[in-house]
Amino acid sequence: MRDAAAYRDLINRSLEPRLRSLGAIPERLLEAMLYSLTAGGKRLRPVLLLAACEAAGGSCETALPYACALEMIHTYSLIHDDLPGMDNDDLRRGRPTNHKVFGEGVAILAGDGLLNAAMEIVLRESVRSGNMNGVRAAEVLARHAGVTGMIGGQTVDVTMEGSAPTEELVTYIHSHKTSDLLQAPMEMGMILAGCGPDQVEKGRCYGYHLGIAFQIVDDILDVTGNPELMGKNTGMDENKMTWVALRGVEQARRDAEDHIRQAVKALQGLPWDTSFFESIARENLSRAY
Ligand code: GRG
């Protein structure tokens, strides 16, 4: 296995060529897609995917197209989340948001384009390899990003804004809006490595708890974080169903710690070194962006 920086570097070098490999894309659309895709970001999801595949005995080369596709879907969700009809934000990844630069119409299309490009990449790769595990990984990606996953969570988040938070609703939103895209890389990487359902379930469970903790930390950072370090505005969640609104900052921090403990525990019994994933989970608790 490599370290997180090496995986991140591989992803950063692969995203643009992978997108361009699809063929001729209208110039303005390509520019808008690349503007957000190459704007940095922690690359947490694709790093997890590559690491899960290699840790479980698979190859990074096999996993790379799937990792790029996942980051494209994550980036599309950020572009759409920032639109005036959603969070109406003007700063993301340290830059003006996509619609501020390209206009709303092109920003919507850039998001749509990244989503579709992602599905084209994973399906093309699965057809090329003829490997059924590739098809399974593509299905997992579509499901976690879809209407029972991230889009479902985002819909409840948007439509319940301004209502009093309940544990059930906040847990639904966090599970789907955020945690689904952290379960996906663990499952996809392990499926691509040929793991069976019991092992994949341990990976999914790790991703679930990491995802909930990740969103709780995000909710805390919206109140306590430094916008310059974060590359986005803070104080944006005032009317939202957040864990901080439900429990307050101190209890939210304890809850995030508890989810990280559960994430680490979920990996017990896997027949390979899981220290990489334990470090990623623990680092999440002290992240400043
Ligand atoms: C379907 C129209 C339509 C839109 C989908 C689902 C969705 C819009 C948006 C969700 C985006 C969002 C804010 C999710 C919360 C998860 C989260 C904290 C994202 C930020 O992830 P980081 O911190 O970002 O990993 P970087 O920039 O590091 O990649």
Image (cartoon, helix red, strand yellow):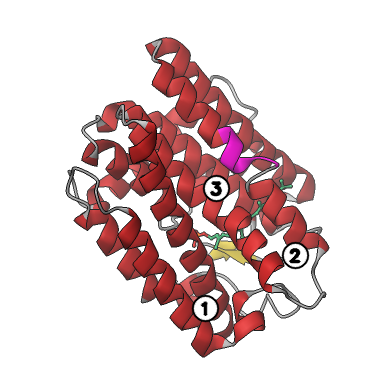
Q: Quadrant of the C terminus?
A: bottom left
Q: Are marks 1 and 2 in contact (CB under 8 Å)?
A: no
Mark 3 Cβ and ligand 1 under 8 Å apart: yes
Tag 2 secondary structure: loop
In the drawing, what numbered circle is on residue 209? Answer: none
Foreground mark, 1 or 2, reads 1
Mark 1 Cβ and ligand 1 under 8 Å apart: no
Amino acid type shown at disc 1: Leu
Sort mark 2 into few (<14), some (14-19) or many (20+) by Cα contacts within 10 Å. some
Q: Are marks 1 and 3 in contact (CB under 8 Å)?
A: no
In the drawing, what numbered circle is on residue 221? Answer: 1
In the drawing, what numbered circle is on residue 74? Answer: 3
Whether residue 143 is in magenta: the answer is yes
Amino acid type shown at disc 2: Asn
Whether residue 217 is in magenta: the answer is no
Residue at left offset 44%, top offset 37%: 68
The answer to which quarter of the image holds residue 160 is bottom right
Give the percent coordinates (x, y) of residue 256: 45, 74
Tag 3 secondary structure: helix
Residue at left offset 58%, top offset 78%: 222
Residue at left offset 39%, top offset 54%: 206
| Image: 254 above or below 191 | below
Please tell me in which quarter of the rendered image ligand 1 is found.
Answer: bottom right
Give the dominant element type of the magenta stretch: helix, strand or loop: helix
Give the percent coordinates (x, y) of residue 141: 53, 35
Amino acid type shown at disc 3: His
Between discs 1 and 2, the one toward the N terminus: 2
**Image check: 56 left or right of 80?**
left
**Image check: 109 left or right of 284?**
right
Distance (Cα) linking label 2 and label 3: 18 Å
Depth order, front residue of 169/99: 169
- Residue under label 2: 88
